[in-house]
Image (tube, grey):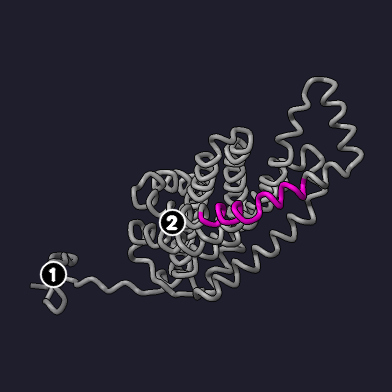
Amino acid sequence: MNLFLDSFWRALAYCLRPRVIALSFLPLVLMVALALGLGYFYWESAMDWVRGALEASSIINQVWAWLQSVGAGSLKVVLAPLIVIFAVTPVIVVLSLLLVAVLMTPALTLLVAERRFPQLERKRGGSLLASILWSLGSTLLALIAIIISIPLWLVPPLILLLPPLIWGWLTYRVMAFDALAEHASLEERREIFRRHRGRLLGIGVLCGYLGAAPSLIWASGALFATMFVILVPLAIWIYTLVFAFSSLWFAHYCLAALQALRAEAALPVATLVPLAPAAIDVQAVTWPNDTTPGSNSSR
């Protein structure tokens, strides 16, 4: 638990470094360009499709009639934008995670290694190709889990549990692998995953909940159209900053765990190494009756 909390506070402090803040803007630029491009080409068509689906539903029409009867008919205007935005949000989250993993995680792990673990040997147990394949495979599994679990989101408690759990699992898989790719061997990485899987998953889940918080800002962009241009980039930047924090948290935790693992492996070897015999000053040894070896005690 000490390692869990220690790595948390260290990651939080590192987020205040100018270098980390500057790195967090790199994915933001790409994500803003992607969001604006998708919005420019597909926003109107997506809105038309959602409105058509809503109007074709008899249940939704009954809900509209009830809302108008209680004086809340204006909610119909904002429902379609909210549906589109909440549908796009998981895609934005996944792309942000991949961009952070590719652009930021290696740089942040190197920052932690240089400042805290300069003597830690780099065994390079994970290549760039392996990291990309690992991230893509984990992302595909997370997307499948999201699609399968969407019907369960209609149950009020589960919508607060399932998405953060899935994002947390994905964050744990991607960030922990990248944090150990440069320094740990394959066997060391597997051993750390085996020993610390619960706490690493806990870090991922907590980061998943933190990543869900900017959705409020994201949704506000639909409610306040005049602030959309400001709120949406702000939400994307907060997403990337949260992922940067999770990268730092995993880097501090995993590298400290790796250092402890190697120290544990080296401990039995160190105890078997005989100590060098100390030089003995024969003249300084006091022998019985103040005699030295070879002297005649009868004198």
At x 11%, y 70%, the residue is: 283
The residue wearing badge 1 is 291
At x 78%, y 27%, the residue is: 73
Nearer the observer, 272 or 127: 127
Nearer the observer, 173 or 274: 173
Toward which corner of the image does residue 64 lie, by quadrant?
top right
Give the answer, above or below, for where 53 lies relative to 286: above
Label 2 amino acid?
Answer: Leu
Q: Furthest-top residue in view? A: 70
Label 1 amino acid?
Answer: Thr
Q: Which residues are magenta?
A: 33-50
Look at the image and tell me whether residue 1 can be seen.
Answer: no
**SS class, disc 2:** helix
Q: Which label number is shown at residue 14? A: none
The residue wearing badge 2 is 26
Toward which corner of the image does residue 69 lie, by quadrant?
top right
At x 55%, y 52%, the residue is: 36
Position of 143 compared to 285: left or right? right
Number of the front mark, 2 or 1: 2
